[in-house]
Image (spheres, grey):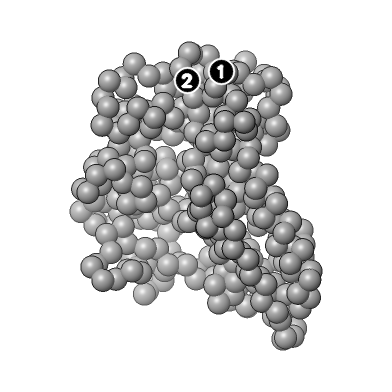
Amino acid sequence: MQKKCDVEQKLPGINRRHFLKIFAATAGVLAGGRLLQQQQRLSTVQETRLLMGTVINLALFSEDEREGQRAMAATFAEMERLIRLFDHRLVTGPLGQLNRQGALAAAPPELVVLLEEAIAYGELTQGAFDVTVRPLLHVGAQDRDATAVPVDYRAIELTGSHVRLAHPGMSITLDGIAKGRVVDGASTMLRQWGYQHVLVEAGGDLMARGQRDGLNPWRVGIPSPRPRRGSARDLLARLAVTEQALATSGDYMNSFTDDYSAHHIVDPRSRRSPAELASVTVTAPTATVADALSTAVMVLGVDDGLSLLERLPHVAGLLVTKQMEISRSHSMIVDPL
């Protein structure tokens, strides 16, 4: 039997897309605010790794450099573990096996939970968010013979640790939700190591905990999906965030055409890339929630997307159309640039 959960009720407590880079530093992204309050001399610990063909950077400030290095190693290990569970590109991983075989007898608990949440977002958005769109991405954005490809999140069957795809040819991508889950996992690991004031960022998804200096909230810039020529960091707005996650989805992140009409986000209903929005930024209690909702709102468009965000607790959004018109939910508070 397919399991479902009530996202609107569960949303504030949920603890759970390519994975890009993770930045962590005070001047950059991550800090132990407790140590900053003590005004002790801190060492900067930094490391860069290549995972899945992508550069990941992690840095932290610590009064004990060796402890910082151990915390960093543990955090990278946790990210790598979660990536192995959620990446559909890894044919030997559990999701790769599920896609290849159509069933998985003993799915890892983390994968089962994330699939449950993905199904719940499918229900919440009436199919605008659907992790079974992977076959559409495989056949290509311009191949409109894809109408025969089975896409239906309701055909994901979960029975305990057993997962089954009910239709032949079905397959799953978690790229619209899993990056957020990895960010949440990294943030949790750093907290377990005693870093209470942290910001973990991964290519548009982030989780901010505590304050950037023990006193003030983190400040995050929302980039323009159409930056002015010669401007690498053209910002639309800034946000002050603490104990909050943020995710941005956009047509510019992986576009197949110069006019951004075809890109990596696909509307499961029309089987085409959504045509109205250029980017969506969502704030939410966790990066998993923000990631899923930013993807879903890209598909829903301005009116339906804002309607969804307005009825969810502890959630806000900023939407940018392809004509660079900006809309935001009532609870989205932006700072002047």
**If you read the primary sequence from the N terminus, does the residue marked by circle 2 or circle 1 appear first?**
1
Q: Position of residue 274 (x, y in %)?
A: 29, 38
Q: Report the side of 176 relative to 190 (left or right).
A: left
Of 278 and 136, the residue lying toward us:
136
Determine whether the residue tagged by mark 2 lies in a helix, strand or loop.
loop
Which numbered disc covers residue 317?
Answer: none
Q: Is residue 13 visible?
A: no
Q: Position of residue 174 (x, y in %)?
A: 52, 36
Q: Is residue 197 visible?
A: yes
User: Which amino acid type is shown beneath numbered disc 2?
Assistant: Met
Q: Is residue 327 above or below residue 97?
A: below
Of 68 and 299, the residue lying toward us:
68
Separation (CA) of disc 2 from disc 1: 7 Å
- The answer to the question of whether label 2 and label 1 lie on touching residues, with beta carbons closer than 8 A, is yes
Which quadrant of the structure image shows residue 162? top right
Q: How many marks?
A: 2
Residue sitting at x 55%, y 42%: 178
Of 122 and 307, the residue lying toward us:
122
**Residue at the spot of label 2:** 170
Q: Is residue 224 above or below residue 212?
A: above
Q: Report the side of 217 relative to 294 (left or right).
A: right
Residue sitting at x 79%, y 71%: 66
Residue sitting at x 41%, y 40%: 296
- Local crowd size for mark 2, using a 10 Å CA cut-off: few (<14), some (14–19), many (≥20): many
Determine whether the residue tagged by mark 1 lies in a helix, strand or loop.
loop
Q: Is residue 248 above or below residue 29?
A: above
Q: Report the side of 212 relative to 40 (left or right).
A: left
**Residue at the spot of label 1:** 102
- Local crowd size for mark 1, using a 10 Å CA cut-off: few (<14), some (14–19), many (≥20): many
Residue sitting at x 23%, y 68%: 229
Q: Position of residue 307 (x, y in %)?
A: 38, 42
User: Which amino acid type is shown beneath numbered disc 1?
Assistant: Gly
